[in-house]
Amino acid sequence: MTKGILLLHGPNLNLLGTRQPEVYGSTRLADIDAAVKRHVSPFDIELRAAQSNHEGALVDSLHEARNWADGVVFNPGAYTHTSLALRDAIVAIELPVIEVHLSNVHGREAFRHQSLLAGVCLGQIAGFGWQGYILAVDALLRRWGMLDEPAAAAT
Ligand code: CA2
C-alpha cells in the first residue's frame, strides 16, 4: 500500500543555495526536493514537499499531513529552538516525524544546541547537508519494511 511522506521546510530555507553556502551548502531547495523525489521513485511512496516562513502555516501542514501522510521529514529552521506550537503539533498528529538540519547545530552557537522538537520526534539528523533528507527518508522506509534490514543486506 502507498505510504505518504511530507517533506516540510521551515523559515528562510527558500533561500538555500543563494546565501551562506559555507554553512548550508550550495544546493537549492527545489533541487533537494527533486533529489528526494528521485530517491523514493522506485518505492510506492507519495511525497509532497512544502516550505513556509510562517509558524502557523507549518502547524497547518503538520495537521493536514494526518489526512494523507504516514511520516514527516521536517527541517523546522530556527523554529527548532523556539516553537512550543510546533512541538505540540508534532505530538498531536501522532505521526513519526524526523527532524533534519543541514548544519551540525550542536557545533554552532549555544542557542542552536537546544531543540524543543527533537524529544517528540522519532530522531534528529544534523550536519550532513542535503544528504540528511535522504537519510531521514531511508529511516522511514526501513521502519515500514521497504528497505532491507542489516541481516538481509549482508546475505
Ligand atoms: O541547519 C539547519 O538546517 C537549520 O535548521 C537552518 C536554520 C537555523 O536557524 C537552524 O539553527 C539550523 C536557518 C535556515 C536559514 O537558511 C538560510 C539559507 C540560505 C541563506 C540564509 C539562510
Image (cartoon, rainbow, N blue to C red):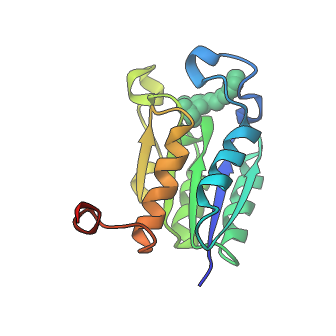
Q: Quadrant of the C terminus?
A: bottom left
| Residue 57 visible from this viewpoint | yes
| Residue 11 visible from this viewpoint | no
Q: Quadrant of ligand 1?
A: top right
Identified at 71% across, 53% down, the residue is: 58
Residue 141: x, y in percent?
A: 47, 66
Quadrant location of residue 37?
A: bottom right
Look at the picture and state if 120 lies above or below 102. Answer: below
Residue 123: x, y in percent?
A: 40, 53
Number of marks in the rendered image: 0
Look at the picture and state if 53 lies above or below 94. Answer: above
Between 96 and 42, which is closer to the camera in this rendering? 42
Q: Quadrant of the N terminus?
A: bottom right
Identified at 77% across, 46% down, the residue is: 52
Identified at 48% across, 52% down, the residue is: 136
Residue at the front extreme, as displayed: 155
Identified at 62% across, 79% down, the residue is: 2
Between 67 and 16, which is closer to the camera in this rendering? 16
Between 17 and 34, which is closer to the camera in this rendering? 34
Residue 55: x, y in percent?
A: 72, 48
Look at the picture and state if 3 lies above or below 37. Answer: below
Residue 28: x, y in percent?
A: 73, 32
Residue at the bottom extreme, as displayed: 1
Look at the picture and state if 123 lies above or below 129. Answer: below
